[in-house]
Amino acid sequence: MISTIFKKWNIILSILFLFSLTGCTISDKGEIFYDDEMIARRGDSFTYISRVGDMNHMEFKGFSGTETIYSASDNVNINITFECSITRGEFKVVLIDESDNVSILEVEQSYDLSLSLNSRIKIVGDAAYGLLEVNIHENA
């Protein structure tokens, strides 16, 4: 009888342990990639397995989520150039206007943009690996 109770508790504890492990490894950062409403949120939510460098020149592995790379604090004209090489996963650069509309910016291009207050530019990834170079210049 004691042996049967011990076996049942052992099975229950094993199942609970397995549930706790899966709860620690599931991340929703990749889901953000496909949801414009989540992308447009003011805050950032991201993870990297590794990241070397800054936005001017960065090599990254396992990037998921959103990270703001530019935020307009006033009405401003900027020139922005992206160079990107993605070897794995999903990656995009987006422009979010003051009304939280999301537009994808093509990489390997240069843009002259007139941004209004609260517009921002973000990178968005889903388990992305690659290189990114960003050059932003504010015009007078």
Image (cartoon, rainbow, N blue to C red):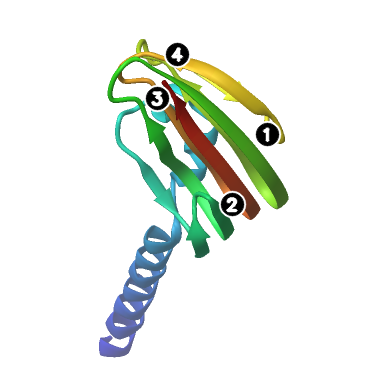
Which picture quadrant has residue 119?
Answer: top left
Badge 1: few (under 14), some or many (20 or more) residues near its Cα, within 10 Å?
some
Callout 2 amino acid: Ala
Q: Mark 1 = which residue?
A: 107
Tell me the distance, in whole angstroms, between the alpha carbons under discs 1 and 3. 19 Å
Residue drawn at (44%, 40%) of the image: 66
Give x and y (percent) for residue 12.
33, 71
First in sequence: mark 1 or mark 3?
3
Query: Nearer the viewer's eye, disc 2 or disc 1?
Result: 1
First in sequence: mark 2 or mark 1?
1
Q: Mark 3 = which residue?
A: 40
Q: Quadrant of the N terminus?
A: bottom left
| Above or below 18: residue 102 | above
Tell me the distance, in whole angstroms, between the alpha carbons under discs 1 and 4. 19 Å
Tell me the distance, in whole angstroms, between the alpha carbons under discs 4 and 2. 24 Å
Q: Mark 4 = which residue?
A: 101
